[in-house]
Image (cartoon, rainbow, N blue to C red):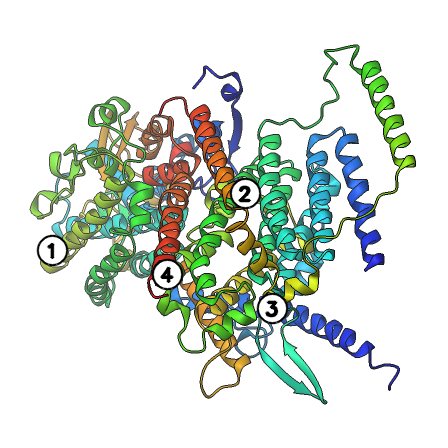
Amino acid sequence: MSQNAARTETMVLNMGPHHPSTHGVLRLILELDGEVVVKATPDIGYLHTGIEKTAESLNYTGAISLWDRVDYLAPLSNNLGFVLAVEKLLDIANIPPRAQCLRVLLVELQRIASHLVWLGTQAIDIGAVSVFLYCFREREQIIDIFEMVSGARMMTSYIRVGGLAQDIPEGFEKKVRDFIRTFPKRIDEYETLLTQNQIWRDRTVGIGKLSAEEAIDLGVTGPILRGSGLNWDIRKSHPYSSYEQFEFEVPLGQNGDVYDRYLCRIREMRESLKIVEQALNRLPKGPVIIDDRKIVPPPREELATSMEAVIHHFKIYTEGFKPPVGEVYVSIEGPRGELGFFVVSDGSAQPYRVRVRPPSFINLQALPRMLQGRLLADVVACIASIDIVLGEVDR
Amino acid sequence: MELLSPLVPILIIVIKSGVAIFALVTAFAYAVWIERRVMARMQSRIGPNRAGPFGLLQPLADAVKVLLKEEIIPQDAKVPIYLLAPAVSLVPALLSFAVVPIGPEIEILGQKITLYLADLNVGVLYVFALASVGVYGIVLAGWSSGSKYSFLGALRSSAQMLSYELPLGLSVVGALMLAGTLSLVQLVEAQKNAWFILLQPLGFLIFIVSAVAEVNRAPFDLPEAETELVAGYHTEYTSIKWAFFYMAEYINMIVVSSIAVTLFFGGWQGPFFPPAVWYFLKVAAFIFLFIWLRATLPRLRYDRLMQFGWKILLPLSLVNIIATAAIMVWQG
Amino acid sequence: MEAFFWVVAIPATVSAVGVVMMRDTVYSALLLVVHLLAVAVLFVLLNAQLIAAVQVVVYAGAIMVLFLFVIMMLGLGRGEGVKEKLPLQRPVALLFGGAMAILLGVVMSQTTIQPVAGALTPGDVLAMGGNTQVVGRLLFSDYLLAFEVTSILLLVAIIGAVVLAKRRL
């Protein structure tokens, strides 16, 4: 290609941060030869908010609300990751079964919601506008459920150290059952529009290939890794929050292209729905939070009768709890991959340092590799298939 | 009155042209409204329903909005061409409607009036000629905007429109051979007994696919693929200049539907209703098809689009011509 | 009709001059398009609608778009900075150009130009079924050999272009 002098002249295209399909404020510096990408350089940091630093000035309960804003498409998964880390720091092992089961249920709903946003944006990036709107219609159902339990549609902060903020309200089960009933048909609908669609296959099969070795070298996780054929799911390999009691499969791809990632995520949604159903069927009775007054505030009605309760209440809301000195790393399988929280405690009520292992940030590293030598039209398909959330990439 | 009589034919032409342009612009406005409503229904939304009953005044509101938008001329624009491009895009679209026959002759006030502006001997070629001139609007817009996205959009669309003009032109040759004429009016009359869709099914398929590509509609809407090129060649256009491109796209869609109806679906012919109504219904069906496609299909990739045009549609259209010729010779 | 001729002929000439005079190659190409369109209208005035339509489809619609395509792709915007490689070019061109102009002027002042009537009048053409039909009939009867030879020539040109453009077949 470079033999001919006229052909070596490349054009630099600045894609983003204001671009409809960079999923937020990602900036890509593309070197184009015609429409072929010679080199792609992602430029990040436009959404940096210093969230990890902010966490150092809040107490542990207060910090939970920050992680909603890191990955705003999967707030509950982020809540859970951080809470599990703090629980490990505090060495709490006796989380009530009801809380554990509900955590799994909600996090799996969250996975579906997040995958729906991914599917919608992937589809609209490739030009299938209607799928986008269908996906958001279903996501609305899930968000309604979240609003029902936590009072907030997106910034839930519902999972707390020791359990959950409160028990689920009446009517919760009916809503989830409605969703379980309708959703499989909806997935079938998306699949009839896309899976065997010749144009869709043309746009995704063989695009953005990542071999299993490359995927490991780059440290990618989640559906991208599994799309490349590697069976790695933290829910299976290091079960947390009672995942070992649930039956589900881990969908795998073969070729590691956009199409395989698409199939993986579609099947993951079906598996997640299975988990949600199992969790709902077996939902145990009992409390949703541990009964440890040093960590969890006392119930509201006790405040009127017990002086001790008032003191505990006062201590927790003015100061918070103080985990022992130490450091922990806990990771969970978020919708986008391994979502890890590294928490250091110096014995005070505020974390000394919190570091998030954001799956989007690490998966984004694979983008230049995927784009090399591909067409401009493939760029958007690849970005979408990584399923980045810029809030998480930049933090 | 006697003195004025030579002026009457000219007067009729002028009035007819005015009516045609007004009708086209109105049709454009309501094509947009229908598209928005129908797409909304297909996507489980409601669509514009606030302005007037069923949102019927929405086009008017949109027009006012567009007119009042700020005029922006980019710093790097080549100004004369940048200003000229929207007109170059719109005018051929309007002109090509001149040969489309809506119906046969009617009589108003003792004057015989034909429901078309001109019955050209080379009617079909005239439409293709204007379509090929319309490409300039897009090429010039992309080049003169001084933006890379616009430029890429322009390159894509010129390549696309050039490539699809060939199968588009060749796909109708079968129908032209059957009718033995290039005049659109005579083509309609030749379909008295059998619509050409029955005799030329392959030709029609090639025609409709190429037509979708030629007017840059989904799934061939690469020049304005918003997720890749922002808005393609008209990224840097605002206000009325942008509206011109928009109008050109929809009017081209109407013209192409009209040509499809005229060449393959018997034009204005049909039982019970007056001819113009049949013409209108048939064109509306095509517009609906365009909208349906847009709501359903993802977008093709550029290289696939070119391969499809050159490696599949073009040979197929040649096969169609040869087969038609062979059958015509065989049947005498 | 005479008036229409002037309405079209003047822009045709002006744009033709513009093609040569313009510094920016894009403008040159665009003026050439204008010129071709004007000539197409002249064809219409001569009752040759088919030729007019073909002129627009092929020359204005296809070939010139490709021209523009190449000019824009290679970014040959303006040629101001280009230094003349042949310094003698200008005076020599003036000399021969002037000689040519004088020669033409002398010849034209000595002769009167008379149009040669064609084989068919517009009325004949209409009687034979129209412009398109007559051209078609002639192409496939009297001029069949020339037509086929041309098509072979074009095919050779296409193959040559493909081979040149694509080194690795």
Q: Secondary structure at mark 4?
A: helix
Earlier sequence position, callout 2 versus callout 3: 3
Marks 4 and 1 sit apart, C-alpha to C-alpha, by 71 Å
At x 51% / y 23%, what residue is drawn?
A10
Identify the residue position indicated by label 3 in the image. B59
Identify the residue position indicated by label 4 in the image. B329
Identify the residue position indicated by label 1 in the image. A278
Percent position of residue A164, x then y: 24, 50
Quarter of image, res A95: top left
Q: Secondary structure at mark 1?
A: helix
Specify the amino acid type for callout 3.
Answer: Pro
At x 87% / y 23%, what residue is drawn?
C98
Instruction: Confirm whether residue A48 shows in the render.
Output: no
Marks 1 and 2 sit apart, C-alpha to C-alpha, by 56 Å
Specify the amino acid type for callout 1.
Answer: Gln
Between residues A395 and A127, which one lies in front from this camera angle? A127
Q: Can you tell which of label 3 and label 4 is closer to the viewer? A: 4
Between residues A170 and C10, which one lies in front from this camera angle? C10
